[in-house]
Image (cartoon, rainbow, N blue to C red):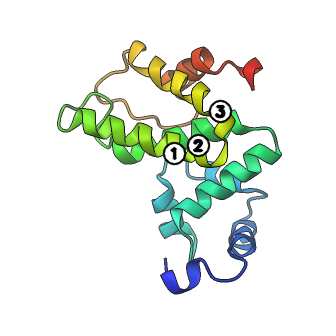
Amino acid sequence: MTDKVTWVGDWKERIHESIASSGASSIEDFLALFPCVPYHKVARDHLQNCAAIQLVQLQFEFAVQTNNVRYAAIDCLSRELADKLKRGWGHHVHLDFNRANTFSSWIVHIRNYAPKYEQTCRSVWEHIPQLNPPNDWIPKSTADQYLVAAFDTGWPCEAT
């Protein structure tokens, strides 16, 4: 990422053009090429002059436009978990801090880009510990059994 260029001009159009040149038809399709990869790594490794937060913003703007916020929230949480809990859900070194960091990063994205879903997302988060994921759990996809179960309970599909 080059700070002098990242936010200059029509950055949204520039990123959309980069995404299209990758063969993806949308930000959602582009991010799906890199499941559970933290946003900053996608931006660094697969785009030029792009900040991670720009990907988040584009993802949620697209999700709101296409009425697919639930999927964007699942995807976003999977990326935050992979980024902040590198050794797994139950790894005890700095566990409380890392879980809080994961939750706060995720919920801030929700609050900024899809605020009407904040309470629903809080409910999803509260269900994860009740599912008792193994200590080394880190989602590998948006279809991860623990993510799906937490969302099915905290944000059922018909609630979207």
Residue 33's tag is none
Q: Residue at x 68, y 34 (%)?
A: 116
Please name the amino acid that badge 1 sits on: Val
- Examine the rendered structure and indicate whether residue 88 appears above or below residue 148: below
Screen quadrant of the C terminus:
top right
Under tag 2, what secondary structure? helix
Under tag 3, what secondary structure? helix
Q: Nearer the viewer, residue 95 or 22?
A: 95
Q: Nearer the viewer, residue 45 or 115?
A: 115
- Examine the rendered structure and indicate whether residue 42 appears above or below residue 136: below
- Examine the rendered structure and indicate whether residue 46 appears above or below residue 94: below
**Alpha-carbon distance for marks 1 and 3?**
11 Å
Q: Residue at x 63, y 82 (%)?
A: 8
- Taking the view exactly as shown, the residue that stands out farthest to the right is 66
Marks 1 and 3 close (CB-CB < 8 Å): no
**Alpha-carbon distance for marks 2 and 1?**
5 Å
Whether residue 143 appears in this view of the structure is no
Please name the amino acid that badge 2 sits on: Arg
* Residue 29 in the image, given as x and y percentages of width and height: 71, 51
Whether residue 136 appears in this view of the structure is yes
- For residue 64, which quarter of the picture? top right
* Residue 122 in the image, given as x and y percentages of width and height: 52, 27
Marks 2 and 1 close (CB-CB < 8 Å): yes
Comes first in the chain, label 1 or label 3? 1
Residue labelled with disc 3 = 117
- Taking the view exactly as shown, the residue that stands out farthest to the left is 93
Q: Nearer the viewer, residue 100 or 41?
A: 100
Badge 1, how many Cα within 10 Å: few under 14, some, many 20+?
A: few
Comes first in the chain, label 2 or label 3? 2
Residue labelled with disc 1 = 108
Residue labelled with disc 2 = 111
Please name the amino acid that badge 3 sits on: Tyr
